[in-house]
Image (cartoon, rainbow, N blue to C red):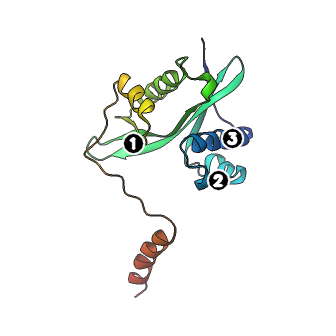
Amino acid sequence: MTLAIRQATIADCPLILQFIKELADYEKLLHEVVADVATLEASLFGDKPYAEVVIAEYQDQPVGFALFFHNYSTFLGRPGLYLEDLYIQPAMRGKGFGKTLLAYLAALALERDCGRLEWWVLDWNQPAKDFYRSLGAEPMDDWTVNRVTGDQLVKLADHFLTQNQR
């Protein structure tokens, strides 16, 4: 089965939001989605795009997407690609489409002289973990993800701002 992969356009933002919500529902995190079409348009296609999206199509119908952006490795001294979301609709899984999307991103990483392609996977998602391992991905068990959001992000930023207003 042939999968077509194309760059998303601003007109795809409703579709991208649909895929984000479907992925979040699968991950039991739908309640955390606050993105809307307008925020996607601004952050993906505005004056300063923060990420890129490719749409996977089978028989001219969208079946999934990948959202990614560049990060940077100081150890390698080179950029990398960070895959934020990879999603294939459930009815289309098992046909090699996820592997094709990841292979596309790997080729894009090499084309852009990136030193690596990386992503996170939820600890409970054993099917995804097994799939990624089958592709040669290595889990980074010795690293812990840290995150600051919401009020704590504001509080931390306020520390800097108050220190530098003297």
Q: Earlier in the sequence, mark 2 or mark 1?
A: 2
How far is disc 2 from disc 1 in space, using C-alphas? Answer: 24 Å
Per the rendering, the mark at residue 41 is none
Q: Is 151 positioned to the left or the right of 12 in the image?
A: left
Q: Farthest residue in the bottom direction?
A: 166
The C terminus appears in which quarter of the rendering? bottom left
List the residue tagged with mark 1. Answer: 123
Q: Is 10 positioned to the left or the right of 48 in the image?
A: right
At label 3, counting other C-alpha atoms closer than 10 Å, the crowd grade (few under 14, some 14-19, many 20 or more) is some
List the residue tagged with mark 2. Answer: 35
User: Can you give x and y, in whole percent of width and height, for residue 107 in the image?
Assistant: 45, 24
* Residue 58 in sight from this viewpoint: yes
At label 1, counting other C-alpha atoms closer than 10 Å, the crowd grade (few under 14, some 14-19, many 20 or more) is few
Local secondary structure at mark 3: helix
Q: Earlier in the sequence, mark 2 or mark 3?
A: 3
**Dot 3 amino acid type:** Gln
* Residue drawn at 65 percent across, 35 percent down: 8
- The residue closer to the viewer here, 150 or 30, is 30
User: Can you give x and y, in whole percent of width and height, for residue 128 in the image?
Assistant: 44, 31
List the residue tagged with mark 3. Answer: 18
